[in-house]
Amino acid sequence: MIPEVLGTVLLGGVGALDATPVGQTLLSQPLVTAALLGALWHDMPVALAVGVVLQILAASTLPVGARTPEDYAVGGVVGTGLALLLASQVSFTIARDGCALLGVFAGMIAATSGVPLLKWQRRQHEGLSRWCEDELRAGNEAALGQCQAAGVGLAFGVGVSYSAACLGLGTLLLMGLARTESVWLSRAWTLAQPLWIGLGLAQLLHAFVQRRLLRVGVFAAALFLTWLLLMSGAS
């Protein structure tokens, strides 16, 4: 289990990198990281069950005005990773459904709690940019590369540290709950599924009204393929 936990923590750092200072590809999306974690933990049903819900929540998050959106790049890794970690310690299917529910809530909490860290990183980046400007005026042409490397190192370090802290704390607080309250958690997961579907349909409708047809197609295809994989795994 140690290699899986280590890989999850490192993926949290990669997600943090992809969200801001490097690339900004799909690697920071919860459904993508969930698929990678499912392959790492050899448990794709639980990973995708959590990942699709966190992806819906992430897609519904908008950076309105000066508001800093929730950090679902790392929150998606934390939620899925914690669900997989808890599920690896239980035996019954009904308990695994409860682990998925706990993972979703853990991912939401981690994404929301990560906002102060994002704001702190932005302040550090502002300081780095001012330093870089001063160095470039002074003739130090290597300052731009050094500044970028510092930003990358900061984001990766924060992502890894925050992911490790959340996984450790979540395991400590939720392992007993996953084992003793599996029936109640499984029922809650079943009752909550129409809510997740409704949020996903609302997001698709919102994107369609805005005529973002490519976004509608990609998002709908991802949800449909995930649903097919979950159904095939359950059968």
Image (spheres, rainbow, N blue to C red):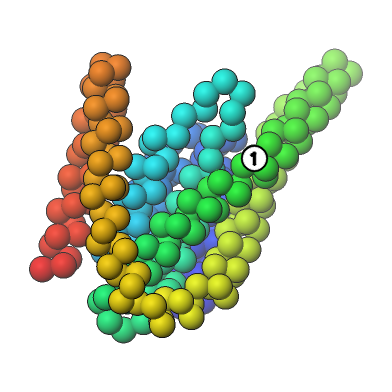
Q: Quadrant of residue 121?
A: top right
Along the horizontal axis of the image, is 191 left or right of 78? left
What is the x, y in percent for residue 96? 32, 73
Along the horizontal axis of the image, is 171 left or right of 204? right
Relative vertical location of residue 163 with respect to residue 207 in this rendering, above or below: below
Residue in front for this viewpoint, 47 or 175 = 175
> Which residue lies most toward the left here?
235
Residue 152 shows in the view: no
- Per the image, the residue denoted by label 1 is 118
Relative vertical location of residue 78 with respect to residue 115 in this rendering, above or below: below
Q: Quadrant of residue 233?
A: bottom left
Residue in front for this viewpoint, 12 or 71 = 71
Residue at point 20% right, 59% down? 230
Look at the numbered disc 1 and give the secondary structure of its residue: helix
Q: Amino acid at mark 1?
A: Leu
Relative vertical location of residue 171 with respect to residue 104 in this rendering, above or below: below
Residue at point 29% right, 24% down? 207
Residue 210 shows in the view: yes
What is the x, y in percent for residue 232? 13, 62
What is the x, y in percent for residue 154? 69, 45
Residue in front for this viewpoint, 115 or 35 = 115
Name the image quarter holding the C terminus.
bottom left
Along the horizontal axis of the image, is 100 left or right of 226? right
